[in-house]
Image: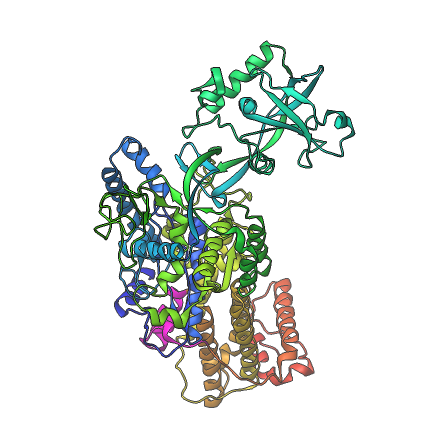
Amino acid sequence: MEETVFKLWSDEDLYRFDPNSSKPTYSIDTPPPYINTPVHIGQAYTYTWMDAIARYKRMRGFNVLFPIGLDRNGLPIEVQAEKEFGISIKDTPREEFIRKARTLLDRYEGISLSTFKKLGLSVNNWQKSYTLGGAYETDDPEYRRLTQETFIKLFEKGLVYEGEKTTNYCPVCHTTISDAEVEYQEHIGNLNYIRFPLIDGGEIIIASTRPELLSACKVIIFNPQDTRYQGLSGREARVPLFNNTVPIIPHSYAKSDFGTGLVMICSYGDYSDVRILRELNIPPTYVIDQDGRMTDKAGPYAGLLVTEARKKIVEDLQAKGLLVKVEKALHREPICWRSKNPIEFIPTREIYLKQVGFKDDLLRITDHMKFHAPQSKSLLTNWINSVSIDWVLSRRRYYGTEIPLWYCLDCGTTIVPPPGRYYQPWREDPPLKECPSCKGSHFKGEERIFDTWFDSSSSQQYILGYLWNKKFFTENYPCTLRPQGKEIVRSWLYFTLLKSFLLFNAPPFKDVWIHMHVVDERGEKMSKSIGNIIDPQYIIRKHGAEAFRSWVFFEGDITEGDIRYSPAKLEGARKFLTKLWNIARFISSFPIPETKEVTPTEEWLFGELANMIARSREDMDNYLFSKAANSIKYFTWNIFADHYVEMVKARAYGDGGINKEQREAAWNGLHAGLRHTLLLLSPYIPFITDFLWRAIYGNKSIHTESFPELHATQKYSDITSKLINFNSTIWNQKKKLGVSLREQIKVSIPTELSPFEADLRRMHNIV
């Protein structure tokens, strides 16, 4: 059924975006998934939410821009290419490496799109096109042109510069990474207590997790409030094994309760080392190179990998009696977010974008975006407040958008091309014949590429037609919604905010929807190494997409916390689909009446239905889709099916001398209840609702309908609980007596339920 309905949507081109529509635009900047691995259950879960948002906004009268993008830039595909082809980026010609990486991307792309199609996403267009709503890839020449244009504009504003700084470096990925790409992992490591002789006699003991940096030790610090070491200020110590002399000074960074309270500051072990040595204006000594090996500054340990040097130095310290003891301690280590390997801090000459000086401005425009859930805003503001270094844009890799610069070999002038096309400086000449400064004609093209987040942070510009429809872009910026995961707030959301401010002095979005994770049944994050990955394709094959989609919304609000995958609850969600199908099958057996007759029972139903519609609209307007879905589910099963349908069943069949008006009133109530229920459920379970709608109410798709409105009397709204309790009490009594629900029973009907007396008597066979 799902495949049949999806084909209808495609044939009817149901969700294509119309840029000329008079409806207000609602734009969704969907997160382009990286396609070197299949779509995982977390992506399937959150994209289903995005789809429900898009479907609901269409029902509310918006012209919904809901494109599908695929991320194909950056390090992951390079690592995959090295692994699958058994090559190294350092030893492979650039064009050959790029060609192999693109081969893999083309192979994987169809797999990702297949999952999204099976989930029933109502994206505007599955085909790549340079139009509003068209599918896009981040390695497409037009997308890369946009990335380069934003860089050129920022360069022209004086916001870009090149300089040599100590920065985060991944020896495995062989590239610098920004602070936003640094993660932290805690592990139990060795805390080595090392003897440092004092120059004028005596010794001190320092505990360190990184003894391989001894040759880079520049200063020893203690906390000014630590009474144990007040007499050390101004004295000097000799670094064991290397014998260079370093000063001892008080500094507030030292923690009296860690190790011995004395800390060696090296160049560089962590961010604090970098900050303190800059503060003290002490020149660094670099002992780790770009391959993660010790430099000649490490003396006899030169050439060793960091881990090898650490082990050998500890052995030598012990052999010379300079190692007091080794303890196990919890260590928080910075790692590369891609390779998961420890990063190092080494000097490289890179291209930077200014950001530190704009923190107050970024906080200001952040206040113009509405966050869902509201508490997720702190993820962004906390990161903004922590920014302490400008954004390093350049990467020494191949598969990404090239930095569009050339350099005059005669005078060193930097050549910035005009915007308008995609440039590849490493393989083409600059768009001029001579240097504007010296009239020279010898140039060298830039070989570095951008940080992939510099590409990704232009996605909202791309989907709003910045390159091809400036009028539409101007009229519809900022983008309406950014949905994304919490783990990339400090990268994708932050960098998008930064670029939007620097380019347009405006926030990039009106609403920001931040989600948590889908975890396994034990609450653990899913990973291949643990073996707890759940493939959404497997779920779709076994249960159908609608069962998965139902579970997504019935399970809970993923903006409030992690969602645990549960096969049992997925099965429970599937049972609701069966219930809905059976309700529709029953009601479809009755004609749709031309008149709108009602009895008090229909008036009660319509009052409940009107309340449900109003509550659902309010919740969905506030992105509380899980709350709304569960309310609709409860109404459908526990109000409409269990009580109204059962109350009017006999009347609908015409049993017991029912007149034409009463019978048609029952048909009216049944079809009104089903129609409105299908409409309310259609953003959540689009396949089954569309199938039933077309089968019962005509060939036109339910997804062309507006969100329902119903104005009804509330004269019976205060007796709903009494009606439910009355029915439930009789059912329970018959169950205890072990008799059929059709058996006669003698019972008094409460006065407040007298308007429904005739239906209740037929329903329960009351005598």
Q: Quadrant of the C terminus?
A: bottom right
Task: Check residue 706 for magenta coloring.
Answer: yes
Closer to us: 615 or 222: 222
Q: Is residue 575 left or right of residue 135?
A: right
Examine the rendering and report whether any part of residue 684 can be seen.
no
Q: Is residue 20 left or right of residue 491?
A: left
Q: Residue at x 64, y 25 (%)?
A: 247
Q: Quadrant of residue 607?
A: bottom right
Q: Is residue 448 left or right of residue 299?
A: left
Residue 534 x %, y %: 43, 45
Magenta stretch: dominant SS?
helix
How is the protein colored in the picture?
Answer: rainbow
Q: Residue at x 37, y 65 (%)?
A: 464
Q: Residue at x 37, y 68 (%)?
A: 473
Q: Height in image: 286 above or below 495?
A: above
Q: Height in image: 604 above or below 390?
A: below
Closer to us: 543 or 288: 288
Q: Residue at x 35, y 61 (%)?
A: 462
Residue 363 x %, y %: 56, 59
Closer to us: 410 or 614: 410
Residue interval drawn in magenta: 686-707
Residue 657 x %, y %: 49, 87
Q: Height in image: 762 above or below 363?
A: below
Examine the rendering and report whether any part of residue 552 can be seen.
yes
Closer to us: 204 or 713: 204
Q: Quadrant of the N terminus?
A: bottom left
The outermost residue toward the right is 227
